[in-house]
Amino acid sequence: MSTFFYMLLAFVVGILVGWFIWGRLRGELDSLRGDLDRTRSERDRLRADSDRLKGELDACGRARADLESRLRDAPKAGADKAATPAPAALISTPASATSAAAKPAAAKKPAATKTAAARPAAKAAAPKKAAAPAKKAAAPKAGAGKADNLRRLIGIGPVNERLLKGQGVTTYAQIAAWTDADVKRIEEVLNFDGRIAREKWIEQAKLLAVGDEAEFVRQFPTAGIASNT
């Protein structure tokens, strides 16, 4: 009887130890899967950047070839232009035509002098209040602000980012200022059920909105540096 009891006890202990080890391994496996997804996303982003840089490099190569061809053709065009004789009308201009053209120019000088003298008087007579509308027109308009990378928040991937932007949410400050009604409305759009509170979107956004990267990394070490999938 005692032998059976010890065998049963060993079996139960083995099951408990195996369950504990399996739970630890399963957590590490989930973590590795998340790292793999982030690595794949980074790889795709690098590939896209590589393709874009290749396209820019090809465009620069074509522009360079175009400039080199223009530089090669420039001396030929200059030589052809120098070899072209000037028109006869420019070479032998009658002296009477030159003097006739000079007289109207001399006649216009007094009028130009009067106009230049009248300008300071007009400026002095103008009221000072006329500059006020110009200052008001030059005042800058309040902009909507630069959009932030919402995918830095845990739980926001490409799909959720697109849905949030469709609702007009583009900055960390907007998410940090969400009320309970805003959270309920956004969860209905994203088809969530309490996920915003579980993943602490508002707490993450508050830290990123003020630029506290150190505290953000300390509280959310699994968040991506550039973006999340």
Image (cartoon, grey):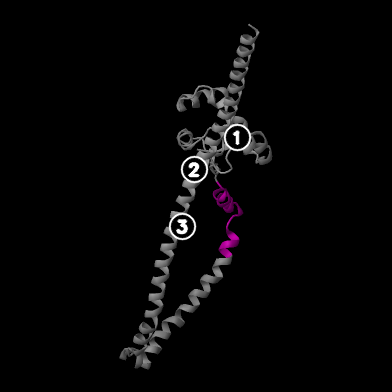
Above-or-below relation of 220 to 93? above
Callout in the foreground (2, 1): 2
Residue 178 visible somewhere in the drawing: no
Q: Decide: few, some or many residues near mark 2? Use Cα within 10 Å; few <14, some 14-19, many ≥20.
A: some
Contact check, label 2 and label 1, Cβ < 8 Å: no
Could you tell me which secondary element the residue under label 3 belongs to? helix
Q: Is 134 colored magenta in this rendering?
A: yes
Q: Residue furthest top?
A: 1
Q: Up-down: is 31 above or below 80?
A: above
- Label annotation for residue 53: 3
Rendered image: mark on residue 57: none
In this view, 62 is above or below 142: below
Q: Which residue is mark 2?
A: 41
Query: Cβ–Cβ below 8 Å for labels 3 and 2?
Result: no
Q: Position of residue 48 (x, y in %)?
A: 45, 50
Badge 1: residue crowd in 10 Å (few <14, some 14–19, many ≥20): many
Residue marked by disc 1: 205
Which secondary structure, mark 2? helix
Quarter of the image with the N terminus in it: top right
- Inter-mark Cα distance, 1 to 3: 32 Å
| Residue shown at the point (38%, 75%) measured from the top left | 69
Q: Nearer the viewer, residue 66 or 107?
A: 66
Hey, what amino acid is under mark 1? Ala
